[in-house]
Image: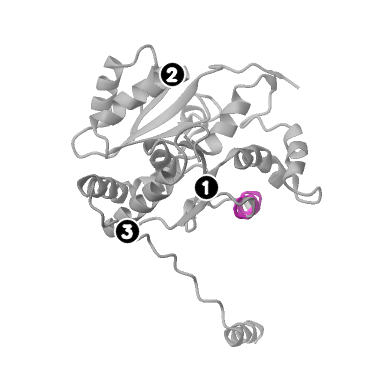
Amino acid sequence: MAEYIPEYVGTVTKYVFVESPSMTPGELALRAYEASEGVLIKETCFGLQVTGEPEPVDRLIEVIRAFDPTHIFVKDRGFPPGDPRRCRANLGGARPGYLGHEREFRILRYITRGLEELDRREGDKAEPAPPALETKPKLDIKRLQELIETEES
Amino acid sequence: MAKVFIYPATSLILSDLVARFGHKPLGAALGIRERIQTAGVDSPPLQITPEEPKRGLKYAAVEVPSGVRGRMAIYGPLIEEAEAAIIVTDADLAFGCMGCARTDELILFTLRQSGIPILELKYPSDEEEGIQFVAAVRKFLDGLPKEEGEA
């Protein structure tokens, strides 16, 4: 068995997603470089990946969020950027995990709307009602019997 | 700052909202990062070694498939560490092979058994639901202790 020597030990990597009508990932990257303090920044199609020691990364994330607070979203990443086990340059096709991001990316605009609206309503006593969880109706036993009979015949 | 387990554990939206409202999201990335940054035997792609299913025995019985126990070795310690949890119940992006599906069921069961405060939600499908979603998350997180030792 081969020995494994990790890279980027002690660092954290975070994804920064930008879903903004007024800022592109390229612009975000340029502005992020200005405040990077030696943090590694990689521009992607959806935003950035930032890698570095935890404190500088947290400070940079704070600055980046301030550019457009309701349109910039951040999450942790386990792998460093360009890792051959994940990078699509080596694997081909979409990076593992990308499709999940794509799925959530489509509903980010609703979250943005929620954040904007709550900021606007700040101090307003009337909180929006929490969403009601629908319970799926259970399959009727007679219907199940019908389904079984249909399959058998 | 409370530690909040998020489900789906890879969720961008939940991870962002938890951090945005001043708490620490516990997701899959933390468990994976720990393994990726630890020296040992090369076991690509996720550095899941034969040791993980053994560690997973703490969370699942020995007759449970090793795939589930290996995954639980990542999620189990995070669930133990969590002081609260946010679950999205209709997360179709959390699908996967049978190992993933059974692990997801075990994660939800373990969370519900743990007795920590849990918020269950559905992903928003329009703007009004988006407002409700964010409001519910913020209200839930506001109720958690912000400082160490705060009740």
Could you say which disc has been placed on residue B53 in the image? none
Residue A102 locus on image (x, y percent): 39, 45
Q: Chain of mark 1?
A: B
Q: Chain of mark 3?
A: B
Residue beneath label 3, please? B129
Residue beneath label 1, please? B85
Q: Amino acid at mark 1?
A: Ala
> Which label's residue is closer to the chain start, 3 or 1?
1
Q: Amino acid at mark 3?
A: Glu
The answer to whether tags 2 and 1 share a subunit is no
Residue most extreme to the top: A38
Q: Nearer the viewer, mark 3 or mark 1?
A: 1
Residue A135 locus on image (x, y percent): 49, 70
Residue B5 locus on image (x, y percent): 53, 43
The Cα–Cα distance between marks 3 and 2, rounded to whole angstroms, is: 35 Å
Residue beneath label 2, please? A55
Tell me what residue is drawn at x 41 percent, y 21 percent.
A57
| Residue B129 shown left or right of residue A4 in the figure | left
| B100 is within the stretch colored magenta | yes
Q: How many marks?
A: 3
**Span highlighted in magenta in the image:** B98-112
At mark 3, the secondary structure is: helix
| Residue A106 shown left or right of residue A94 in the figure | left
| B58 is within the stretch colored magenta | no
At mark 1, the secondary structure is: strand
